[in-house]
Image (spheres, rainbow, N blue to C red):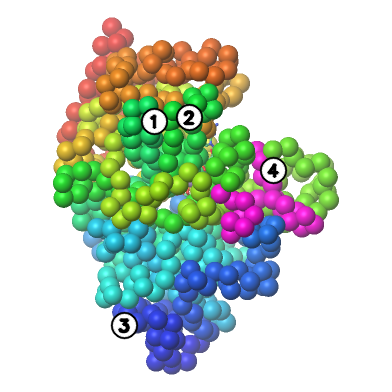
Amino acid sequence: MVDAVVNVAAVLEAAGLTNRHVQEFVEHWAGVTGASSVQVVSAADDERLVAEALEAGELVPAGEGRYYARSYVKDTARAEERTIVATGDERDRGTYNNWRPGAETKEKLVELMTGASAGRTMYVIPYLMAPAGSPLDRYAAGVELTDNRGVVLQMIRMSRVGADNVNDLGDDFVRGVHVTGDLANLGQGTPDDKRHFVTLADERTILHFGSSYGGNALLGKIAHGLRQGSYDGWKNGFLVEQFMLLGITDRQTGRKYNIAGGFPSASGKTNLAMTLAPEALGDRYYVEFYGDDIAWIWVDEDGVLRGFNPENGVFGVAKDTNERTNPTAIDSIVPGSGAIFTNVAYNERTQDVWWEGRGDKPTDLDGWLDWKGERIADRAPEHADDPWAHPNSRFTTQLANVPNVAKDWDDPRGVEIHGIIFGGRTRDREPLIRAITDVAEGVYDGLTLGAEATAAADGLEGVLRYDPMSMRPFLSYPEADYAQHWLDVIGQARNQPIFAHVNWFQRDAEGRFIWPGYRENLRPLVWLMRLRSGEVTGVPSPVGILPARDELDLAGLDERTLADLDTLLTIDVERWRQEIGYREEHLAQFDGLPEPIWAAHRRVAAALDAERE
Ligand code: GDP
Ligand code: PGA
Ligand code: MN
Ligand code: MN
């Protein structure tokens, strides 16, 4: 136990954490969790903490200046069914995120956390989820308490960490408590599952118990950066979305377009933001990286829609990342980058890491361990073909390591947003790209984003579901309010963005992706830029404007892709009419959905009917 309350305050004071409200918060939870000591951390502590983690065996070296960690086998992805948003207002009950009343939920978490960090250090992580000095700063500061050193190392990479972020804020910070729990005895996936990942949104308090996986344990990133953020944005006039954010510059015209986009977890955001122009297009275009997972978006005092990435790092999916698909990612995790790999395969002899899609599978099995830590050379024949890496294995690296990071990525004013796109894994129906110029139709399109869930959500891979704007796992208020909030915020902007729906994941009958994807995804985005600036007109369809074949830059695409282009660029009207029925059923679940959304739905439905006749 932490002995006297006064000692905690003294420890924090000595570490330069002078905010009395933060001190009281730490004292309280140190008492509840029973941590044996308290330690304030800042980014400057990284080297020491890495050394300690290596010493303790929590990390192992993956070559010089890179690290590898393995998580508990039942703790490798976000657990959506264990995720709760709680408030004191019954009207906040939504369809997603298992709304519960705040008071009783908090009580439950206090019970679970009581004494659960006994004998461990409680790390105090003061952080900011924004470039410092932004107009949204007051919503961006937080303090995460965690009993897990690995979580500290990840947080230092993913957010801006240091006491200065919270000292002058009084009571205006998000309170986060993370307790790892006894991972081998939490009943994961059983009726007696002890894991609880709770955001008490109206108290700006986050209590997570029972995981050390990034998506459950990095409270700044997921729980604050998205769940708490979306609630605060709803109450205070801004949008918080699971969006990547990139800028495309056309050197020939000098124009730059910034595009934000929502794709469900593990559906291509990080890769898109890191995209480089396809070689075949020469050096006409270049893409700058702003963010790969979260955007906070607002309308500034001049009426301009702007956004920034609140994060400081990338938590990327390893699978299929290689020099061809994503050379930028490979360059941002090189030796010396400080990158941390989680749940990939590891060679204890050579300190190499490997994952499916990294390149040729090593033929010399000596020293290789799979993501569970089992020796690959000793595998039983029936397990010979098991993946070496977990499908949701990840790398964590700082934005400063990303070669195409924009020079103004840290600008607190954010950047103007010209386009908003939605996409996901959809094996049929959705064409490569369809542009939408009407705001209500764009918002409607986001609300009806239907895609396959991925390995980033435990137990849901491949399930087809609606995922509004890709925020389903993070939405902290009801869908009807969400729709209205979108219409309100975008409606205020005088630089109305163009919307588009994209799909990199159409498959043929054999299950093969018919679009090459990755860097080639720039081609439809360039078309969107040109559509917005009036250089092309596209072809109208009931579900938006499609590119005419000759409006897409096709230079260097292979024969097979060219042969599939008609499939990629047309819609199946019958399939879409069926979809309209599903959407109607889906949207009808939400009471009070704004009339402009229903009107948009009816317009699309009528246009499809007219097409058929
Ligand atoms: P995020 O979680 O939304 O950021 O998605 P990532 O960019 O990390 O990608 C998730 C997975 O999808 C990775 O295994 C990628 O290799 C794969 N992926 C990303 N973009 C594409 C694409 O354009 N085509 C295909 N086939 N796979 C992609
Ligand atoms: P992702 O980020 O969207 O890049 O996969 C992590 C997550 O959403 O769980
Ligand atoms: Mn995400
Ligand atoms: Mn990502």
- The amino acid marked with disc number 1 is Arg
Q: CA distance from mark 2 to mark 3?
A: 54 Å
The quadrant in which the C terminus is found is top left
Question: Considering only order in the chain, which callout, 2 or 4, is on the residue closer to the N terminus?
Answer: 2
Residue 430: x and y in percent read 42, 24
Could you tell whether 485 is left or right of 114 in the image? left
Span shown in magenta: 332-358
- Residue located beneath label 2 in the image: 283
Picture quadrant where residue 341 is located: bottom right
State the mark number for residue 387.
4
Question: Are there few (<14), some (14-19), or many (20+) residues within 10 Å of tag 4?
Answer: some
Is label 3 in contact with label 1 (beta carbons under 8 Å)? no
- The amino acid marked with disc number 3 is Arg
Question: Considering only order in the chain, which callout, 1 or 3, is on the residue closer to the N terminus?
Answer: 3
Residue depicted at 54% across the width and 19% down the height: 557
Q: CA distance from mark 1 to mark 4?
A: 43 Å
Q: CA distance from mark 4 to mark 3?
A: 50 Å
- Residue located beneath label 1 in the image: 251
> Is disc 4 placed on a helix, strand or loop?
loop
Q: CA distance from mark 2 to mark 1?
A: 8 Å
Question: Considering only order in the chain, which callout, 3 or 2, is on the residue closer to the N terminus?
Answer: 3
Decide which of 613, 551 is in the foreground and name it.
551
515 lies above or below 220: above
